[in-house]
Amino acid sequence: MQISEGQAANSNSRELLTFTLGKEEYGIDILKVQEIRGYDAVTTIANSPEFIKGVINLRGIIVPIVDMRIKFNLGNVTYNELTVVIILNVANRVIGIVVDGVSDVITLTAEQLKPSPEFSATLDTQYITGLGTVDERMIIVVDIEKLMTSRDMELVEAAAA
Amino acid sequence: MSIDMSQFYQVFFEESAEHLASMESLLLGLDLDAPDPDQLNAIFRSAHSIKGGSGTFGFTDMTEVTHILETLLDGIRKNEIKITADMVDAFLQAGDVLKGLLEAHQNGTIADLAPSVEIRARLEQLTAAGSQKTEGKGQKTESAAASGATQTAASSVQHIYQIKFAKSPAIFPKKTDLDTLLEDLSNIGKIENKKIAAKSVALTLITYVSEEELRETFSFFLEPEQLTVTLIGEQKAEEKSASSEDDLGYGFFVEPETLKAEAENAQGYGFFVEPEALKAEVENAQGYGFFVDVEKKADEPAAPVATAVQTEDGTPQRRATDRAPAGGAAAETSIRVSVEKVDQMINLVGELVITQSMLAETASHLDPVLHENLVNGLAQLERNSRELQEAVMSVRMMPINFVFSRFPRLVRDLAAKLDKKVQLKMIGEGTELDKGLIEKISDPLTHLVRNSLDHGVEMPEERIVKGKDPQGTITLRAAHQGGNIVIQVIDDGAGLNRERILAKAKEKGIPFSDNISDADVWLMIFAPGFSTAAVITDVSGRGVGMDVVKKNIEGIGGRVEIASQSGQGSTVTIRLPLTLAILDGLSIAVGDQLYIVPLSFIVESLQPKAEDIKEISGQGQVIHVRGEYLPVIALHQVFNITPRATNPVEGILVLLEAEGKKVALFVDDLVGQHQVVIKSLETNYRKVVGVSGATIMGDGRVAMIMDVGALVKFAQA
């Protein structure tokens, strides 16, 4: 919530990159997105959870790839030339997430963003900034930084310990 | 303060810190009975540079302290004041005060001025006491005059040596090697009667340096028996260099009206003289080589030095360092570059090497006859990029002396605090290692040295009872060993006490078997909260430390080992990888995955025969290799992957040795040997058990680098 408030104060609206996981549409802060690329062969990491596919070489940087579809049991887990990886830049780390598809970039004003109700969603509500409505579409706005550094994702040392 | 100035602050802070550090190490190395004039000059220059810099930037508190420090130092190096242990203490204290002030400026906080006032009073008192004592003695160094050659030593007698040494291609592989040596010689003295024959070289050298120092010059090229140095005569220093005197005057800024006199004076001693003495002084300065009437000089007390120097307070100063004869050369040949730039360069070169191997791989599918030029070009590219890589890597390498240099002070202070007599020996200070390692090794090493001093070395009385030299010795040793840097902290103290450690382990509830080996007992002291010190001192004994030491060292890919002999002392050995960034490795295949095994751990690889593999019920397999039974670790089991070969006979066994234990690693295939650029997994991910890092292979794919130490531990579990 802090982030949304901070940015709302600046421009009263924010740009989000939206992607789909199964039938749900999610939005993340576009400033956290470094690039979007196709799915490449990954090098698996021994004894890591199933949703961590492994690491790839992104121009000399070793980047872990997380398959959100496996993590949240959404969508068809297949890998082909249409599989999309969003490379994120969060908490000084570079992390790639596999999603079903990237939709578009939308601008959401503060009025369009509603607080999320307390329901038991696939995604823990603590990572959801709010729900946005654009043209009859409901977009779940995710605090991607908080999610990626959380204990659940097992991506960060402190959380893993 | 204007913005323009503040952008130079950082450089000033860094330089001052360096000057303070070098001042400290020089002070500690000073022989009080016969202080080396070179060292005194160097100390003076350091103090002077700090003063100059702090004056420029308006840090007057620092200027004030250095000013008094400099006055006293100036007196000492001109033999007006005899240096005492008390003074060295005061200098060290002044160094600490300056460090404090420097930090305060760096952090933008207000420094506590009380210590600086105190030290100023102490230094002033010492200056006054010192100059009274020697007043009337006059100055010996006044016999100075100038000669063209720069002399680094300043003893007043020149030695004439007859030098003969062997010359063969083995000693001087390149012609330039001999030239270099001769150039070195001409830097320290004057070469005459040079005769270069086919097999030997003979020459006469007139120099100030002692025979010992002279031999050191040769030691780089020659074995001692290949060299004869005969002292054939001495000569009074009529031609003594002015250079050491020159710098007495440098950097002294005076009011315009006195400038002229000062400029002339500068050749002399940098202080004002009574008007009636001025003429003589100027004559002296111009008439090089004249011995000055000692009595005339004697009535000039040291005090005017202070007055002369006073005028420069607050006035902008030029940097004096560049003009310092000894320090100047080093300063000009190095540049200050931020680590980020170097790291960026290393990354880019790493990328280049990867691109190059990709190209090489693509080209390997081409017909070498048809594409001869391309193949040749690629071979050259490979060589060039390797060399470039090595050159860039070497930029990051620094001598370990950067860490070692802090220990003489630490040991000196700590020994005094604990009433122990300890000498510190340092061996291999020139050993180079990665800058990143240097930074990370300094804290663990400090812990180890403190521990050795506090727990290892006994009190002098106790040592006498044991028949040892009352003065204990702590040795710091650094050396390259294979692909590793080995750093040892050796003390000749009491050694570790097995019973006490085991008792403590019992108390802490750490399980151990009754016939636990000594090596395992020693490793217990790395357990968190483990301290066997009977009394907790403020030096050590709280039990935090050794576990941190171990953690820090393992964090940079190193290992710690302890050897100890009761009553003889103990040795802590730290093994570190040569660099954090590059590794020689063997790539191995398991299933569809490629792993890199660091070459330094590999003993051999073999295809096992069925009869050599033995099963131990519930323990897995062992292999019989030349009389040894080694446990077989199947990599596919450790990493949970589907292998191509499930029976060791179908695959390859790689024998690994780490932490003194050997294991056989069962893999599908050996792929090749590579030099790989180590990339951290932890930058974007987290630590993975059994993997020490990752690298990018020629085809752009990522391969994991195995943590052999962890694998060996796995075998024991």
Image (tube, coloured by chain):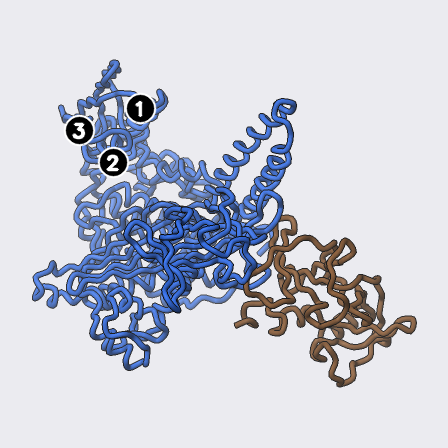
In the shown orientation, is residue B630 left or right of residue A121? Answer: left
Residue B65 seen anywhere in this rendered image of the structure: no
Q: Are marks 3 and 1 on the same chain?
A: yes
Q: Amino acid at mark 2?
A: Ala
Residue labelled with disc 2:
B154
Marker disc for residue B273: none
Residue at 22% across / 24% down in the picture?
B205
In percent of width and height, residue B691 lies at: 50, 58
Q: Amino acid at mark 3?
A: Glu
Name the N-terminal-most of marks 2 and 1.
Answer: 2
Cα gap from disc 2 to disc 3, whole angstroms: 28 Å
Query: Which mark is drawn over residue B225?
Result: 3
User: Of the residues tagged 2 and 3, which is closer to the observer?
Assistant: 3
Q: Residue at x 30, y 57 (%)?
A: B573
Earlier along the polypeptide chain: callout 3 or callout 1? 1
Give the class, few, some or many, for how many residues have Cα within 10 Å of label 3's Cα (few <14, many ≥20): few
Q: Which chain shows up in brown?
A: A
* Chain ID, mark 2: B
CB under 8 Å between discs 2 and 1: no
The percent position of residue B560, horizontal first and vertical second, equals 34, 60
Q: Label 1 is found on which chain of the structure?
A: B
Can you see residue B398? yes
Amino acid type of the residue that numbered disc 1 sits on in the rendered structure: Phe
- Relative to residue B694, is residue A119 depicted above or below? below
